[in-house]
Amino acid sequence: MAHVAKYKKERVEELAKLMEQYPAVGLINMEHLPASQLQKMRGQLREKLLIVMSKKNLIKLALAKSKKGEMKELEKYFEGMPCLIFTRDSPFRVAVTLKRSKSTAAAKPGQTAPRDLTIQAGPTPFSPGPVLGELGQMGIKAGVEKGKIVIKQDKLVARKGEKITKQTAAILQKFGIEPMEIGLNLVAFYENGLIYNSEVLDIDDKKTQEQLRKAASWAFNLAMEAGYPAKETISMLIGKAYRQAEAVQSAAKPDKE
């Protein structure tokens, strides 16, 4: 780092020191995030994590300097405009917090569709006019009923991963569809020698809760079948044994002629 300017060396030292102080270090992509939104989120999340922005090459140097060898692998996850976050909390709890803090926004031309975007069939608030022609140009089947435009059939206007055109962005906005999310996009997290990517960290609360409920139900049923005594099963096992004993007793009684 002999050729690196003094202020850059100091910045790298500062980042490397933070990497040693915090048990969990995350990488986020701040591309397309408005400055006003960043300041708002910084205020909201101050108690949970520290957000530190720096130039990409300085972050790389700090990662290379870190004593936590595995942390250097975060460099492989650089996307767009990388930024570091530091926390003492669980990476999974932080991921959920960041996901919940996002807000929706209209799509702009040139942005990438985050999912398949469809104009749904059904009534619209639009009166016949130029909108009908715009829909036709997009291949959207529409007609007029009771003085209002009606979409006759669902129409996929952009597939996930495709660039959104100016025409598509305008149609989506007319229909009030805001497919984009504004927020801190978590890319990866380092903790205790392990790196979790965004797919691992993306937890669906409802799906996870349902999986836990099913697992608890299966475990309870298995314990009952195995006759395993526990606080949750003992009363039902005793009741089951009593009923079985009654059944055996009834079967053993001689039939009265």
Image (cartoon, rainbow, N blue to C red):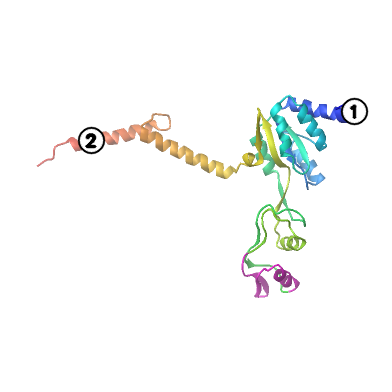
Taking the image as shown, residue 234 lies to the left or right of residue 157, namely left
Please report the bounds of the magenta region as a residue range: 129-154
Q: Position of residue 139 (x, y in %)?
A: 68, 69
Q: Residue at x 62, y 39 (%)?
A: 200
Q: Amino acid at mark 2?
A: Val
Identify the residue at horizontal 33%, vertical 34% (top origin).
Answer: 239
Q: Position of residue 226 (x, y in %)?
A: 36, 33
**Residue located beneath label 1 in the image:** 6
> Is 119 covered by the magenta stretch?
no
Which residue in the protein does label 2 denote?
248
Given residues 120 and 67, the one toward you in this image is: 67
> Is residue 23 something one can see in this rendering?
no
Say whether residue 134 is magenta: yes
Please tell me which residue is depicted at 76% across the width and 41% down the height of the picture: 41
Separation of marks 1 and 2 at Cα, in angstroms: 88 Å
Label 2: which secondary element: helix
Amino acid carrying mark 1 in the image: Lys
Q: Secondary structure at mark 1?
A: helix
The answer to whether residue 230 is left or right of residue 87 is left
